[in-house]
Amino acid sequence: MDLSGDHTKSTKDFWDKIRTIAIAAIPIVIAVVGNSFSASMKEKEIRLKTVEIAITVLRSRSSTIIQAFPWARQPKKNFLKTRFHQL
């Protein structure tokens, strides 16, 4: 009895299954990483826009506008968590 042929076949089947799983997993991994990157960039854009709005509010001399946006007076506490060089 020659069992080496059966062993080779089972080893080949194993690697074929691994290859199939890897081929199926690659698009999923790319989608997850891409989505994570996109969400991170969107969050940074939102933070930057918030800073721009706060600067506009603080530059205005209208007390009504400043009262409408009280968070603009406390930038460190509320939205300046990202360093500007990261944006």
Image: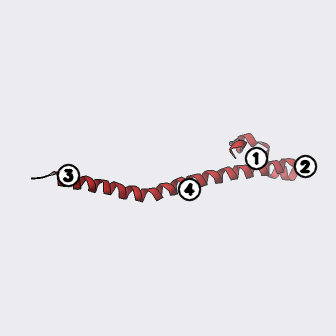
Mark 3 or mark 2, earlier in chain: 3
Mark 4 or mark 1, earlier in chain: 4
Element assignment for label 4: helix
64 vs 5, nearest the viewer: 5
The residue at which mark 4 appears reads as: 35
- Report which quarter residue 78 is drawn in: top right
User: For the residue marked with disc 2, what is the amino acid?
Assistant: Arg
Up the image or down, 1 lies above or below 81; here it is: below
For mark 4, does the 10 Å Cα neighbourhood hold few (<14), some (14 to 19), or many (20 or more) residues? few
| Alpha carbon distance from label 4 to label 2 | 41 Å
| Alpha carbon distance from label 1 to label 3 | 69 Å
| Alpha carbon distance from label 2 to label 1 | 16 Å
Q: Position of residue 44 (x, y in %)?
A: 67, 49
Element assignment for label 2: loop
The residue at which mark 3 appears reads as: 7
Q: Position of residue 28 (x, y in %)?
A: 47, 57
User: For the residue marked with disc 4, what is the amino acid?
Assistant: Asn
Element assignment for label 3: helix
* Relative horizontal placement of residue 31, taking residue 20 as reference (left or right): right
Mark 2 or mark 1, earlier in chain: 2
36 vs 2, nearest the viewer: 2
The residue at which mark 2 appears reads as: 61
| Alpha carbon distance from label 4 to label 1 | 30 Å
* Relative horizontal placement of residue 38, taking residue 32 as reference (left or right): right
4 or 2: mark nearer the eye: 4
For mark 3, does the 10 Å Cα neighbourhood hold few (<14), some (14 to 19), or many (20 or more) residues? few
| Alpha carbon distance from label 3 to label 4 | 42 Å
3 or 2: mark nearer the eye: 3
Q: Please count the marks in the image.
A: 4
| Alpha carbon distance from label 3 to label 2 | 82 Å
Q: Tell me which residue sits at (18%, 54%) in the image.
A: 5
